[in-house]
Image: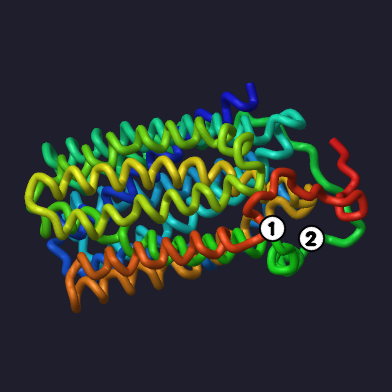
Amino acid sequence: MILRLLVTGRIAERFADELTTLGIPLIATVTLASSPWWIGVINAGLFAAPVLVALPAGLMSDRMSPRALMAVGAVGRAAALGAIALVWATGALTEWWLFALAGIAGAAATLYQVTSAAAVPAMVEPGTLRAANARIDTGSHVSSTVAPIAGSGLAQAVAAPLLPLVGGAALVVTAVTAARLPEPVRAVHAAPPRIRDGLRYVIGDRLQRLILLRGMVANLGGVMVITLFPAAIVRVMGYDELVVGLVLGITGLGGIAGAAASPWFARRYGDGGAVPMLALGGAAASLGYPLALASPHGWDIAILFAGELGAMFAMAAYSVAQRTLRQEICPPHLQGRMNASLMFAMMLVAPVGALAGGAIAQAWGIAAAFWAGSALLALSAAIVTFSPLWGMRDLPRPTASACARRTP
């Protein structure tokens, strides 16, 4: 029952996430006819606000009701996304409005995501964490397949600003499922939780630090690509909005397969070895982005499709592997602040990636931004490849002294 609620809530939340990721750049590209620089600025707003929220959200998730925080995050995000459609309907939508509302939506999403990641280890049965993460991510990647296709069709048939509104409606489901979750077992400590304890733990632990550094570099490069993905297909390759959704939607099948296959990679290469193996696969697949823009018409969309399919598979499998690794080696009382510290660092570089991608595209073209993003993804894979993770079959567990006594 608990896992079913977690999966259902994540599917709905990911559906909204996909519509937001697709819809906001499409609104800027098609509805507002924004420049590449403005597209980068707007996406930076989506990623910048969570920087302010991530660390406090981690502290709250270790001290307050996870289900209440998850519900509040879902409702707040739904309101911000619905406001985009409302402002557009009044004829007042501008780049600044889109920037502000995207930022609010991003902040609310961070509250939900940090809290839910911290709650899962305490809610599932012992020994089932990897399987639970795989099931949650497999379900969420169903949304990665359905949402872009449905969203691009809606954008083409009606209007792109309606995509955030549909995403907001899906988040109502997320809020309801969150409210029905039980309160997890809490960690008890003599000293009150502090934000800096999570940061100190992540920076001080060798494996957590590697995952953090790889995530920051990968996010920097990945955001460069994500920001300009719709513009590349519509403006450079000459296809319409429906093709954007079809590419993102059909390649979402790679995400479903990757999440489901992640436990196999852990069995085959070890709990640690699966991480660099999947990071390398994602870096290799990302070469499809710039190569597509250098290919003839017809071949370009096929190469882009193949690259996105491989990247989605590797990203989904890697996500399960690294999250399970981080959760299993982290003491229970630090789960919220550990996840928050990682998200804080990831979101810290995301606006830089969006702005850098927009600036590079403005100056030298979208293809140059794609090459820069792929190079950063290759660098991120090298960080975990040349590390103790390679070949590590078993993970170190938290020591008894590091773990708090847990009470209902």
Label 2 neighbourhood size at 10 Å, few (<14), some (14-19), many (20+)?
A: some
Instruction: Using the image as rendered, state which of residue 406 and residue 292 is in the foreground.
Output: 292
Which secondary structure, mark 2? loop
Q: How many numbered callouts?
A: 2
Percent x, y of residue 282: 42, 51
Residue at 70% over, 44% down: 393
Which is in the foreground here, disc 1 or disc 2? Answer: 1
Residue at 43% over, 40% down: 14
Label 1 neighbourhood size at 10 Å, few (<14), some (14-19), many (20+)?
A: many
Percent x, y of residue 285: 35, 50
Residue at 25% over, 75% down: 360
Q: Quadrant of the N terminus?
A: top right
Residue at label 1?
337
* Amino acid at circle 2: Pro
* Circle number at residue 64: none
Residue at label 2?
193
> Is there a contact, CB below 8 Å, between mark 1 and mark 2?
yes
